Image (spheres, rainbow, N blue to C red):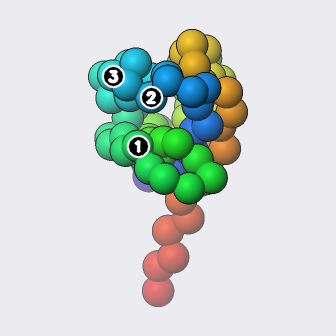
């Protein structure tokens, strides 16, 4: 079974376009949107495990210049 997570991203002022461009081209990213509210961007990430997603966030997303903070929300599939 695949793992999916929403990555909530806070950005430095003026960084949105550059960060969006980088994140939208990354392999595990299914979708990325700039949003209004307490976070500036939300990415939907799909990996083989939650550990793979965690490493991806730490090594790839958090190291992008302009990314100030992330919160990873793992998707839990509720099945009957």
- The picture places residue 35, in percent across and down from the top left corner, at 44, 50
- The picture places residue 76, in percent across and down from the top left corner, at 56, 64
Give the alpha-carbon distance from disc 2 to disc 3, as whole Å: 8 Å
Image point 45% across, 28% down: which residue?
A: 16
Image point 57% across, 27% down: which residue?
A: 13
| Mark 2 in CB contact with mark 3 (< 8 angstroms) | no
| Mark 2 in CB contact with mark 1 (< 8 angstroms) | yes
User: 10 Å neighbourhood of mark 1: few (<14), some, or many (≥20)?
Assistant: some
- Farthest front residue? 14
Q: Is residue 46 above or below residue 63?
A: below
- The picture places residue 37, in percent across and down from the top left corner, at 56, 56
Q: Which mark is residue 16?
A: 2
Is 62 situated left or right of 15 in this image?
right
> 79 or 13, which is in the foreground?
13
Is 66 situated left or right of 22 in this image?
right
> 34 or 75, which is in the foreground?
34
Q: Is residue 68 above or below residue 71?
A: above
Q: Secondary structure at mark 1?
A: strand
User: 10 Å neighbourhood of mark 2: few (<14), some, or many (≥20)?
Assistant: some
Q: Which residue is mark 3?
A: 21
Q: Which mark is residue 34?
A: 1
Work out whether residue 43 can be spotted. Answer: yes
Q: Secondary structure at mark 2?
A: helix
Picture quadrant of residue 70 = top right
Give the alpha-carbon distance from disc 1 to disc 3, as whole Å: 11 Å
- The picture places residue 19, in percent across and down from the top left corner, at 44, 23
């Amino acid at each position: 079974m695949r793992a999916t997570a929403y990555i909530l991203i806070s950005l430095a002022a003026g960084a949105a376009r550059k960060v969006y461009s980088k994140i939208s081209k990354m392999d595990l990213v299914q979708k990325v949107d700039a949003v209004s509210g307490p976070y500036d961007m939300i990415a939907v990430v799909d990996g083989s495990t939650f550990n793979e997603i965690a490493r991806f966030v730490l090594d790839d997303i958090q190291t992008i210049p302009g990314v100030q903070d992330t919160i990873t929300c793992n998707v839990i599939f509720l099945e009957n």
